[in-house]
Amino acid sequence: MAAVYRLLRCGAAARYPARRWLSVRVDATFPASLAAAKRDPGGRGVHWVFLGCPGVGKGTYASRLSQILGVPHIATGDLVREELAASGPLAQQLAEIVNHGQLVSDEIILRLLSKRLEDGEAKGESGFILDGFPRTIRQAEKLEEVTEIDLVVNLKLREDALLAKCIGRRICSHCGGNYNLASVNIKGENGNPDIVMAPLLPPEECASKLITRSDDTEEVVKERLRIYHEMSEPVEEFYRARGKLLEFDLPGGIPESWAKLLRALNLIDNDDKQSAAA
Ligand SMILES: Nc1ncnc2c1ncn2[C@@H]1O[C@H](COP(=O)(O)OP(=O)(O)O)[C@@H](O)[C@H]1O
């Protein structure tokens, strides 16, 4: 498998026979039940991708699903922020790009992702849920050259809600917990339902330690949304054409959305009803 990730790194065009590892096959109708996923512990974990605009909740739902499915949640935005925090040779260049809402070059992102996948493999990880990758057609093509993606979940939410959620996002500088101070209450128009999303407030011990991401200002979020439409929306079509795209309109906050997402993914067993309510 290391060979696969080296291919990502050096960009060789050979297509790896990814089907060899398939255990939980999720096809265009997404019938992989949680029971099926648990039945075959010897096979590889799922290869899923989460797409969606900044602030839509890719991290929240990808992280929850990764725990259920026993695969790592790999967010390229986190890899970029780790690189920034390490203050290595790349840091200044990355800060300039990220703080202006631009995309990091495909080469750098592929290098960071390859390294993360190789490190994971060395620790015995299998499968993944990617969040924030691929974000360009070139990244999607590179990924397709080296492995098979089972399913791509495209999370969708109105733009005014996205903006409010990005601006309300906070992180606890002590424990790393993610919170959101935004209280979204948008009247539905043209037959669309109202969108109500309660804030996700921090516990008392985190309240005084909250920080805001430097790229979550209104100006930078608007630029990130513009870049998403220009560079990343074509990736939706890339996967739609391959029959792998599951479109998912978020109905509201986490309680309603999580239960609906588990149903859409056919991941609710009798044993797991309580996880949908969490
Ligand atoms: N796949 C990628 N390609 C290029 N740049 C990326 C990629 N993933 C993350 N980045 C960079 O990291 C920043 C933060 O990413 P992320 O945390 O995924 O943000 P968002 O909340 O906008 O989805 C992006 O604005 C971009 O500069």
Image (spheres, rainbow, N blue to C red):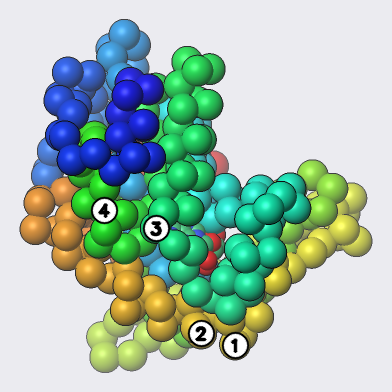
Alpha-carbon span between mark 3 and mark 4: 10 Å
Alpha-carbon span between mark 3 and mark 1: 24 Å
Q: Residue at x 59, y 87 (%)?
A: 219
Tell me the quadrant of the picture where the C terminus can be found: top right
Q: Mark 2 points at which residue?
A: 222
Q: State the image quarter where residue 175 is shown.
A: top right
Name the amino acid, label 4.
Answer: Ala
Q: Which residue is drawn at 54% across and 55% down?
A: 77
Q: Which residue is drawn at 27% across and 58% down?
A: 138
- Up/down of 59 relative to 145, above or below: below
Q: Name the residue under label 4.
A: 140
Q: Pointer 1 and pointer 2: residues touching (CB < 8 Å)?
A: yes
Which comes sooner in the sequence, label 4 or label 1? 4
SS under mark 1: helix
Label 2 neighbour load within 10 Å: few <14, some 14-19, many 20+: some
Q: How far across and how far down the image is residue 204, in percent?
A: 87, 54
SS under mark 2: helix
Q: Is mark 3 within 8 Å of ligand 1?
A: yes
Q: Name the residue under label 3.
A: 106
- Up/down of 119 relative to 202, above or below: above
Q: Name the residue under label 1.
A: 219
SS under mark 3: helix
